Image (tube, helix red, strand yellow):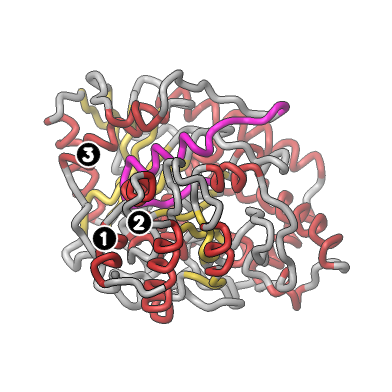
Amino acid sequence: MPITDSLLKTYADADGLELGGMVNRGEVSPAELVECAATLIDRLNPELNAIVHKLYDMGRAAAKSVDTAAPFAGVPYLLKELASSWEGAPTTNSSYYLKDLVATFDGVAVQRTKAAGFLLVGKSNAPENGWSISTEPKMYGATKNPWKDGITAGGSSGGTASAVASRMVPLGEASDGAGSIRVPASCCGTVGLKPSRGRVTLSPSGDFWYGGAYFFCNSRTVRDTAAYLDALAGGMPGDVYTPPTPTESWLELSKRAPRKLRVGYSVTPPNGTAIDPQVKAAVEATVRTLAGLGHEVEEHDMALDGDAAWKTYTRMCTVETAVVFDFLAQFVGRPVSPADVEPITWAVIERGRSLKATEHASDIEALRQLSRAVATDLNPYDIFVTPTLTQLPRPMGFYDMSMTDLDAYNAKWHDAAFMFPFNFSGHPAISLPLAQSKEGIPIGVQLVGRYGDEATVLAASTQLEQAMPWKDRRPPIAA
């Protein structure tokens, strides 16, 4: 169907709830929104490579029966090309080893996404197996940052972040094992919430990385993020992590100005590395704004040996990765080989297979103790503010998955020193696009809440969205 320039402009300017509201009121049809997304993807994606599978026909078919009363009725959506299962969609994890796999069922989070009214129009790019904070898989090629050529869009959810920032879709799936929701949000100027451990069930999986991996979204507004949390949150019987749940919706709680908060902040990375002066200034401007809003602010550096914790966390992840590839062999029909995956992925698998069960058990216990230590250290604060990345987005190629030295590769992640501690601790953490560099590159600032308290994180984020607005910023490559 023909789509007018006026409708395309409305689509590109709106967030997901606004588009869903238009469908609720009969002002636009779900089919028209799918065509808007298809038009913009065809226009913008050749330059950005944010989307690796166009699934317009799936969206068009589902548009005929979508619940037009749902909060995100008819809203175009991207699923990340990593782990999540949407029946009929490719599920390659950006790996040649899985190049022929297609999902045969909907995961529980996907079922809830469909019930909220979203329509799948594509799958977003991700690095192979997700183990990079840039999105440059050999299988699909690099995703570009819409703000500047030559710099990373972040990872591992860089495809989603680039597509959301450029307004191909208002919201898409992102996942986070060591910053992969928040890092691309910082690089591309989007909103990226990593929820509390256990907030969104991983069913049919029992667990990922002992609670260290999370599946949620990138969006452009806090209210879309809050409403998506309402749609996805909730455990299943037997889930191993069960955070406390408020009696009101997160969308409503996000609108309510928080009481006077005790805010801690740090601009000192827990691994002792440097911080870019512009990033430091962004954090300091944020806490000044929070103080001006009436909150109590104090500086507090984390009592964490970041290097030692990172080595323990990444060693645990290698065993989990090896187990996953052994599991996938039944679907591929043969074991994975070095020829099937990128060199760093093979190094991860080999490391995981080399570790003893007693060593792995010791790592799990160490991470449990570290989780307790982080929670105890930050418990005095309602909100803890940090940089998202300690540096501006790195040049493409900086995180090189053709490396074979796993320790050297993992050491390059020092920019994300404030990311992974909250993966193993389970705290909710959000990256907000609160600043820009002198060149106009987004700078994310992270807000961390107590375990289970997304409500305070979202309410404080709404205050900052109003006080330090980003809505009208648009990258050079955008609708």
Say if residue 387 shows up in the picture: no
Q: Secondary structure at mark 3?
A: helix
Give amino acid for label 3: Leu
In whole angstroms, how far apart are the C-alphas of marks 3 and 1?
25 Å
Name the front one of labels 2 and 3.
2
Q: Secondary structure at mark 1?
A: helix
Name the front one of labels 3 and 1.
1
Instruction: Pick whichever, 315 or 51, lies toward us.
Output: 51
- On the image, the x and y values in percent for residue 204 come to 72, 42
Q: Count every numbered label the image shows and give the total.
A: 3
* Label 2: few (<14), some (14–19) or many (≥20) C-alpha neighbours in 10 Å: some
* Residue carrying label 3: 464
Residue range of the region highlighted in magenta in the rendering:
215-238
The N terminus lies in quadrant: bottom left
In whole angstroms, how far apart are the C-alphas of marks 2 and 3?
31 Å
Q: Are marks 3 and 1 in contact (CB under 8 Å)?
A: no
Above or below 36: residue 454? above
Q: Secondary structure at mark 2?
A: loop
* Residue carrying label 1: 10
* Residue carrying label 2: 28
Q: Quadrant of residue 442?
A: bottom left
* Label 1: few (<14), some (14–19) or many (≥20) C-alpha neighbours in 10 Å: some
Q: Is residue 228 magenta?
A: yes
Q: Are marks 1 and 2 in contact (CB under 8 Å)?
A: yes
Above or below 223: residue 319? below
Q: Is residue 340 left or right of residue 424?
A: right
Give amino acid for label 2: Val
Instruction: Determine the residue positioned at 38% across, 51% down.
Output: 219
